[in-house]
Amino acid sequence: MEYDKLLAPAAVAMRPSGIRKFFDLAADMPDCISLGVGEPDFKTPWAIREAGIDSLEHGRTRYTANAGLKELRAEIARYMERRMHLTYDPAKEILVTVGGSEAIDMCVRTLIEPGDEVILPEPCFVCYEPITTLSGGVPVHVACKAENEFRLTAEDLKAAITPKTKLLILPFPNNPTGAVMEQEDLETIAEVLRGTNIMVLSDEIYAELNYGLHPHVSIATLPGMQERTIVVNGFSKAYAMTGWRLGYACGPAPIVKVMTKIHQSAIMSAPTTSQYAAIVAMQECDSEIERMRDEYNHRRRFVVKELNDMGLTCFEPRGAFYTFPCIRASGMSSQDFCTALLEKKHVAIVPGDAFGASGDGYARISYAYSVEHLQEALKRIRAFLTELKEKA
């Protein structure tokens, strides 16, 4: 078989995940400390696990409606109104998906035709570009700069828009930088978009992990923006439910209808057990969100201080659970720095350019780990930097 002729060029051209590359290398080092994966180290709260067990014990294991359990969609609608100040019709404007990643995929597949341009503020999560190119879309990268606290500016957005622009992906709070967009920042973005035919995919998976003075604000809450915004969220980060694989999309009924139709053919429905567990998560676990966020905030302050003290200039992240220190003082590229650190000190972090070319000169460090774990890793990073200086 001539497989090279059979494989779809767009699929072959996809970049492998720069996150998983270092995670896989670390797995072969028994004493390696990994700060590379963005996964909560907390166990899923017991009330959620118990609800999942209960659904199995009662034999609730059949397919659900394609869009998700009616009870869960109603609970998502209540959550969005209660926590995000947004109103959605659970029957027509909410789709339950296999993680937030599937929601992103369904949205892009629904909107993007070959040649359509998708604006990607970067550094950003690794899935946006390949999902765009698989649909024939053209990624347009807009660099978010440290001097702007890694936020998207209205000026940079306006400069990136062309007659072919169809979609803006707005990934805040941001992975990998931890940047957030405050309401005044979002208002300037909304002003650029009003009067255009550009949609927004607002990836708000880290919405509950916001450490600023103000709570998370969705761009969909601004005047005239809900009708042009698909909000993506999920249970992985806020509720420590990564392995349950459950997310959702909220948006205008005509778009959610088509997303559901694609989801119906590609997936059928999200995991039934996870959906029953998620109902309890939204009903009973607000306090668990607060508890985990407080612990992340403690770790955040500790890691940022340690990195700055050792000479790795670190912007103070306001959301998610990542720091994005500048490693240029080492004189090395992101790839070389992270590879050498892994080889010499057995600490795995992710090169900044895994999140786009503008991330070179930085590295992503996750603080979704215990303080003891972080202390040992940072001790090794400090020793690595000391050895670099001695050789210089």
Image (spheres, helix red, strand yellow):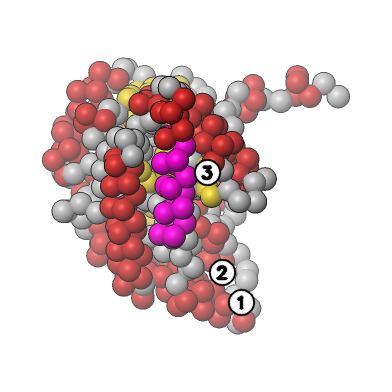
Helix or strand or loop: what does disc 2 sit on?
helix
x 25%, y 57%: residue: 84
Looking at the rendered image, the quarter that the C terminus falls into is top left
Earlier sequence position, callout 1 versus callout 3: 1
Q: CA distance from mark 3 to mark 2?
A: 36 Å
Name the residue carrying label 1: 56
User: Quarter of the image holding residue 92?
Assistant: bottom left
Using the numbered discs, state the Cα–Cα distance from disc 1 to disc 2 in whole angstroms: 7 Å
**Closer to us: 100 or 352:** 352
Amino acid beneath label 3: Val
Residue 373: x, y in percent?
47, 56
Question: Residue pushed farthest front?
Answer: 390
Residue placed under numbered mark 3 in the picture: 347
Tell me the element at label 1: helix
Q: Is residue 159 visible?
A: yes
Residue 138 at x, y percent in the picture: 45, 22
116 in magenta: no
Tell whether 8 sits left or right of 363.
right
- Provide residue 129's location: percent of width, then percent of height: 47, 30
Q: CA distance from mark 1 to mark 3?
A: 39 Å
Disc 2 target residue: 273
Figure check: 271 above or below 305: below
Choose mark 3 or mark 2, whichever is in front. Answer: 3
Please report the residue visible at 46 percent of the width from the left and 49 percent of the height from the top: 377
Residue contact between numbered discs 1 and 2, judged by CB atoms under 8 Å = yes
Q: Is residue 304 above or below residue 290?
A: above
Assign the magenta stretch its main secondary structure: helix
State left or right for residue 189 relative to residue 303.
Answer: left
- Amino acid carrying label 1: it is Leu
Residue 290 x/y as whole percent? 30, 67
What is the magenta range? 368-385
Tell me whether circle 3 and circle 2 mark residues in contact (CB < 8 Å): no
